[in-house]
Image: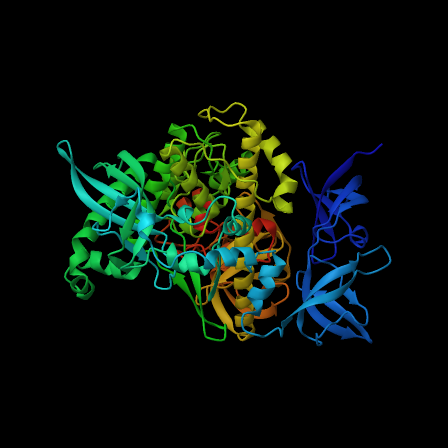
Amino acid sequence: MLEEIEGQVQGHRDGHGFLVRDDGQADIYLPPNEMRAVLHRDRVRIRVVRIDRKGRPEGRVVEIVERPDQPIIGRLLQESGMWLVAPEDKRYGQDVLLPKGALGHARAGQVVVVQLTEPPALHGQPVGRVVEVLGEIDDPGMEIEIAVRKYGVPHEFSQECLAQARLLPDKVRAADRKGRVDLRDVALVTIDGEDARDFDDAVYCEPVRQGRSKGWRLLVAIADVSHYVKTGEAIDTDAYDRATSVYFPRRVIPMLPEKLSNGLCSLNPDVDRLCMVCDMVVDAGGDVQAYQFYPAVMHSHARFTYTEVAAILANTRGTEAVRRKDRVQDLLNLHEVYRALLRARASRGAVDFDTTETQIICDDSGRIEKIVPRIRNEAHRLIEEAMLAANVCSADFLQAHQRPGLFRVHEGPTPEKREILRAYLKALGVGMTIGEDPHPRDFQKIAELTKDRPDAQQIHTMLLRSMQQAIYTPINSGHFGLAFEAYTHFTSPIRRYPDLLVHRVIKAILDQQHYQLPALPVPGEAHAKLSRRLQKATASTSGRQTPKVRMSAAEQQAWEAAGLHCSANERRADEASRDVEAWLKCKYMREHLGEEYSGVVSTVTTFGLFVTLDALYVEGLVHITELGGEYYRFDEARQELRGERTGVRYAIGTRVQVQVSRVDLDGRKIDFRLVQSGEELLTRALRDKRGETVSDPRNPPDKRERKGRTAPESDLKPRKSVPGKSSAHKKVARDRKSRR
């Protein structure tokens, strides 16, 4: 009898699908005829019936185990007298039929939410009814309304949560200050972006003597959310359900009600606020020699922006410095300790690649005005290093007291990714590689070695791609990218639930108690994956030496569930944000159809090139059929497409000229047509085939051939990707935060 395999269906816009197996093994292909009776996200049991012509195992559905109660969002259409809804998420491969009386007040063309009343069958489409009308497709903010429902992002607080929030005080009361260290005379300040509304953290630094050497006392004060959000209460339940705030252009869906996130918990200037403090002594080498945690009350002495602080540090006699003269010395102290922390970062070999992130600037109606790069200045880095130091101390505190909590774990590259990276570095003639058990210092050394090469960005992009995503788990195995043996998230409890949990554990330790997780609800996605995740964690840590933690098997399972839930919802928030950005970029590019732009190849696949435009920071696909009338072979080691007849090569970093040829708003796809691949590409390729060379004063021909250069490179930095592409491509340009 053939083995039956259980998992979740993942649909594809082309009509077929895949079974994502519960045991974590390779996905199983489901042909279009098997997808007719199932929907995206259904849980099913299948049997493998054959191997298809592409070498993939092909499955046949034998049982539908569970259908999630997930509404479908789409546009209401009328065709041949019949009403139907075309799903906005094209992974749902079938339209939903609506009988008479199931339309509610919806009109043709509007975006609606549909609840299924009859599932699909082999010979029948799914049937549903309209339960909510969102509005017209071009209404301002419609892309966000769609995304929060498409990805199941909680966007309305429960009535119990709102009622509890209304009962909270408007300011810090005398009773709230009891038992706290009074830091109101300490000149703590916040440093954030111009558009920030909630302020999690404040900092202060002063010089101290470390024997005969100079050192610093660094205070990182974090909003004490746990004082107001009590374990297991209504606000806490809603916060756990969300697990994180979700950021869209022009709108934020907060983890906490606004009274807390922008008011009582936010470290606003010139008002008293409760905080948890990590008080550190840092030596001249950037090492934390001592630290302590304690609850305090503070009074922010200033609200700085990154731009202001960078300007003051660059010119202590400039306009900004004169306006903030009382705080200039404090900022200089912060800058000194930051330089010391940077030395420690370099000493431990942490990965530090420069990447370019983008920011979408919208007008009042929600349309994109422009897309600009986010510039990270000295102030950004200063705050980042201070937060890293506090996070490391919190991890050490948990381990020293052998208490369970959520660590931020980032493991090294998988064996598969290590092999791909080694082959790539060898193909390009890089004089270094990584071993079987690489250290982040190895990656940083390769980045330093290649930083002056014309293909530096190509190489650095591949280094980034080899990294895994960071997760939350009670089983600590260190943070590879930051080169820390233990790391937590402590510094953002207003917008991240794991930070709130870490605060509660620290407080319990200070009170000589043991924090117990509440019986919080476990959403279906996390619950479905919990058992196999626990099995993997057990297997992967069986030979690992980790500090003993005092907790029962049930408690460990509860912490595992919390970590899995927070990790899954972090991904959910990222996907929803990327989906909205992709929608906005597609609408923006519809206005530029037919226009030509220069760009750089950011990803190479078997089916074409993804190109990022220089001027607009938008990415689109040049399909392989647009590359000319010859056969192109994909070289995985070099990450390039090469024409068999002409030898023309397209690799990451190759500069091209493209025309915007097609925009698919529903599919979140932008297509380009190659206008000019560059005469140099073809000339060089043909001369290579004839055994000739191309003169390049920066790179002599013999040296170029030894290094295996493939095409003219660009010194542009990697851009963030547009979603809606291949799964491999989605992993390319992760947000820096996902690795921390």
Work out whether residue 674 can be spotted.
Answer: no
423 vs 738, nearest the viewer: 738
**Residue 204 percent coordinates (x, y):** 24, 48
* Quadrant where the C terminus is found in the figure: top left
User: Coloring scheme of the render?
Assistant: rainbow
Residue placed furthest toward the right: 123
Q: How many marks?
A: 0
Res 289 → quadrant: top left
Give left or right: position of 595 versus 271.
right
Above or below 142: residue 93: above
**Residue 646 percent coordinates (x, y):** 57, 56
Give left or right: position of 226 versus 520.
left
**Residue 476 percent coordinates (x, y):** 47, 32
Residue at image x 78%, y 50%? 31
Residue at image x 34%, y 41%? 390
584 vs 636, nearest the viewer: 584
Give left or right: position of 424 versus 319.
right
* Quadrant where the N terminus is found in the figure: top right
Work out whether residue 474 can be spotted.
Answer: yes
**Residue 287 percent coordinates (x, y):** 27, 35
Residue placed furthest toward the front: 175
Residue at image x 19%, y 56%? 327
Res 71 → quadrant: bottom right
